[in-house]
Amino acid sequence: MSIAKILVVEDDTELQEALVDTLELNGFDVVSVGSAEEALVALDDEIAMVFTDIRMDGMNGYDLMKRIRAIKPYLPIVLMTAYGTVEQAVEAMKSGAVDYILKPFEADVLVEKAKAYFYRDASAEEDFVVADATTIQLKSMAKKVAESDASVLITGESGTGKEVLARFIHNHSTRSKQPFVAINCAAIPENMLEATLFGYEKGAFTGAMKAMPGKFELAQGGTIFLDEIGEMKPDLQAKLLRVLQEREVERIGSSKLIKLDVRLLSASNIDMKKAMANGDFREDLFYRLNVFPMRIPPLRDRPKDIAAIAERLLQRHCGGRRVEPMMSAPAMRSLIQFQWPGNIRELDNVIQRALVMMSGETIQEQDILFDESFHQDGEIALKASAEETSEQSTKESDPKPSIEVQPQSASMDLKEREVQIILETLKVNNGHRQKTAEALNISPRTLRYKLARFKEQGLEVL
């Protein structure tokens, strides 16, 4: 098990090996790949920093950086190139790089950059976008609480932006130059979570081939964010409570106590008081976490935020690779009127679909596809509203039929449009099946079936 890694993207095999050796000799765990396309596949929650070459075959380092910034805006990225100029360096920093190295460079320069940016938060404060009166007040409150070291418990539905708020608090605190270490307690197997949080010594358990620091140690001097803390099992809650009370941690398999200087932020999307009443969460730990409670309302309760966040998502996903489109008034109205059960994550999906669907320079209402626009088998349902159907039926001169298209009676035009959407989304994701399926909100199995069918029809599939 690894705690955190540096991703090295370099197409020169010898240089790649030298970079990996240098970083590993200085205590870093490293994942190395030879192309930007491989980097996007390797990018997971264990990656805490990226070094990437700029000039590579296929996707270059600039475009890779923009893609990573769209997915993980907080991830620090250092660009490397032998063709550097001052202008390039300035442009790289503007585009989101935290630093820039000119080849050839000494090993100590690489190590210096790694130590400076590893586990740092590269996101901008503007990532916490607010426009509604409720969230404007929340942001103002966050700035005030950031000045203290008080523990903060952030609650709200899944996808409302709890981690974004936590990063905002960290970025406005006196610890902003120190690490921000985030961990999703629900995403790590129960038997691994203790080792991930507190670290372990070599031989502490089967598979512990070397000593590893825990998340609390990695956050030393900075902030640790425990997301979905309500999912933590009671026995581990007791150990966490002791760490918070004593301000010290002990690695598994060690008797040495490590003093901690860490601020704790946590989040949950469950009813914590109900969990305490059911005996699923310790009351004493809850009050240790809940020094300053903050609740983020669901997106449907802050309609003014929808337009502002949609604009930010458009900027992020266009990222200089294409002209940022306008959003038509009907399209924006449909976004604001939607209930958003998946909150910002769902809005992000809808914006990405709109960028795939649109033609011209403006996103139209028909380009807005919500989750219910897709049937379970992945077919896209185009359905006119009752009002539009009634209006069209009274106009004999209108050549467009006012029908509801069901998957079993889909027209050829609809089938062709579906093929176009899938292939374009696949291209946007550089042939990555899993990400394409997620963007289209269909299962990977459905996507594989459809791509196989396209190939049988003689279509070119990435």
Image: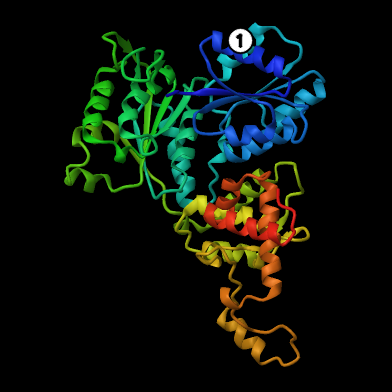
Q: Residues within 10 Å of mark 1 (few under 14, many from 20)?
A: some
Residue that mark 1 sits on: 22
Image point (55%, 65%), residue name? 374
Q: Is residue 172 in view from this perspective?
A: no
Q: Is residue 211 in view from this perspective?
A: yes
Query: Given the image, on which type of amino acid does mark 1 rest?
Result: Thr
Disc 1 is placed on an element classified as helix
The front one of 93 and 189 is: 189
Answer with left or right where residue 21 lies relative to residue 168: right
Image point (61%, 54%), residue name? 351
Question: What percent of the width, then of the height, locates residue 396?
Answer: 72, 93
**Quarter of the image holding residue 451?**
bottom right
**Quarter of the image holding residue 64?**
top right
Q: Is residue 365 above or below residue 241?
A: below
Image point (61%, 48%), residue name? 313
Q: Locate the N terminus and report the quarter of the image it occupies.
A: top left
Question: What percent of the width, then of the height, locates residue 13?
Answer: 71, 19
Answer with left or right where residue 345 lies relative to residue 224: right
Image point (30%, 30%), residue name? 191
